[in-house]
Image (tube, rainbow, N blue to C red):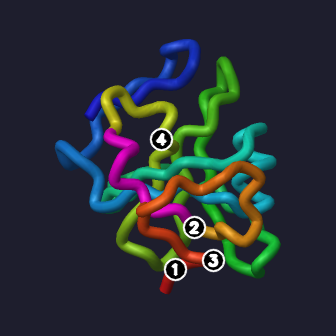
Amino acid sequence: MDVSCQCGAVTFKTPLPKPLAVYICHCDECRRQSSSAFGCSAIFPTFRLPKKERPTASGHTLNCYFCKACGTRLIHTTPGKNVLSVKGGCIEGLDWKTARHIWCKRAMVPIPEGVERSEEEPE
């Protein structure tokens, strides 16, 4: 899948033709990071990236990757996991219909009927 930042300075292809999973997250961090009512992450197997760490409110460490020109957040990873998250809005042709909604107890918008959902972070 083709991925790009807002200005087009950073582009790459995902390692698979479709993500392993898609999450729409309604937690406070994702809402603030996306400046919206939720964040969207498409999960892919890890590929080589430089290290950029920051702590999270839950006590984990998160590696975040941004475009230096426009500031778009493209990827985040958690150390020790063999997958990474590409921000859904940066992926051309992402199928959002199969997304699992997480942290629904913090949702600011209605969650569609019939979707897979978790009140907090999934196991």
Magenta span contains residue 99: yes
- Horizontal side of residue 123 vs 72, given as left or right: left
Query: Which of the labelled discs sits on residue 122, or is there none?
Result: 1
Q: At 76% across and 81% down in the image, what residue appears?
A: 59
The residue labelled by disc 2 is 102
Q: At 54% across and 48% down in the image, what residue appears?
A: 40
The kind of residue on which mark 4 rests is: Gly
Of 93 and 82, nearer the camera is 93
* Mark found first going from the N terminus, 3 or 2: 2
> How many C-alpha atoms fall within 10 Å of the one at disc 2: few (<14), some, or many (≥20)?
many
The residue labelled by disc 3 is 119
Q: Are marks 2 and 1 in contact (CB under 8 Å)?
A: yes
In the rendered view, tell whether residue 75 sits above or below residue 4: below
Per the model, the C-alpha gap separating discs 2 and 4 is: 15 Å
- Horizontal side of residue 104 vs 46, given as left or right: right
The quadrant holding residue 78 is bottom right
Per the model, the C-alpha gap separating discs 2 and 1 is: 7 Å
In the rendered view, tell whether residue 70 sits above or below residue 60: above
Write the start and end of the magenta stretch as one range. 95-101
The kind of residue on which mark 1 rests is: Pro
Per the model, the C-alpha gap separating discs 1 and 4 is: 18 Å
The kind of residue on which mark 3 rests is: Glu
The residue labelled by disc 4 is 88
Of 50 and 110, nearer the camera is 110
Q: At 76% across and 79% down in the image, what residue appears?
A: 58
